[in-house]
Image (spheres, grey):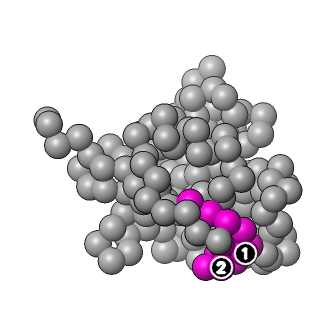
Amino acid sequence: MTLSIREGRLADADALAAIYLACRREMPYAPLAHDEASVRSWFADALLQTSQVWLAERDGQIAGFAACSMQDGMRWLDQLYVAPGHQGNGIGRALLGQVLSPSKQACRLFVFQANAGARRFYEAHGFTLLRLSDGQDNEERCPDVLYQWLPDTKE
């Protein structure tokens, strides 16, 4: 199986939205804040227009994606989703590596507190917990965690 990573394009919006929706359906603790049509529109009209988006293709099929932004001088990992049928095969690790490797700058992200798998993943990749919150600042109103990754300054 061949894995490649490339920049996302507007033509990928539907495939990326489908992965996002499939993953979010598996999160009963965090109901979607928007209907599917709005989510699909957001991918095409906002996310792919304003964020740096990387996607992973396995044997020609889009298997996952990551989206980053810069806010107040800080790099943020806003989205990282791997399609349910492709999880556990190193795709998330490859995408995260793509996000973190181009620069030696800190990166932050939020994840739902109940998402134990994602929390283990980020902690295993060097992210440290900065803050727990009650979720009042996210659209789903679900308790979340703020994590931060710092580059290795010993190099």
Tell me the distance, in whole angstroms, between the alpha carbons under discs 2 and 1.
5 Å
Q: Nearer the viewer, residue 77 or 60?
A: 77
Q: How far across and how far down the image is residue 130, in percent?
A: 43, 59
Q: Nearer the viewer, residue 73 or 3?
A: 73
Let me know if residue 11 is in the magenta part: no
Instruction: Please tell me which residue is depicted at 63% across the width and 32% down the height of the picture.
Output: 58
Q: Amino acid at mark 2?
A: Gln
In the image, taking residue 43 as reference, residue 151 lies left or right, namely left
In the image, taking residue 137 as reference, residue 123 lies left or right, namely left
Q: Residues within 10 Å of mark 1 (few under 14, many from 20)?
A: some
Q: Amino acid at mark 1?
A: Arg
Let me know if residue 144 is in the magenta part: yes
Q: Earlier in the sequence, mark 2 or mark 1?
A: 2
Q: Nearer the viewer, residue 129 or 47?
A: 129
Location of residue 119 by image quarter: top right
Q: Quadrant of the N terminus?
A: top right
Residue farthest toward the top in the current orientation of the protein: 1
Q: Secondary structure at mark 2?
A: loop
Q: Nearer the viewer, residue 6 or 27?
A: 27
Q: Is residue 5 visible?
A: no
Q: Are marks 2 and 1 in contact (CB under 8 Å)?
A: yes
Q: Residues within 10 Å of mark 2 (few under 14, many from 20)?
A: few
Extent of the magenta region: 135-145
Residue named by callout 2 = 136
Q: Secondary structure at mark 1?
A: loop
Residue named by callout 1 = 141
Location of residue 108 by image quarter: bottom left
Instruction: Please tell me which residue is depicted at 49% across the width and 63% down the height of the picture.
Output: 131
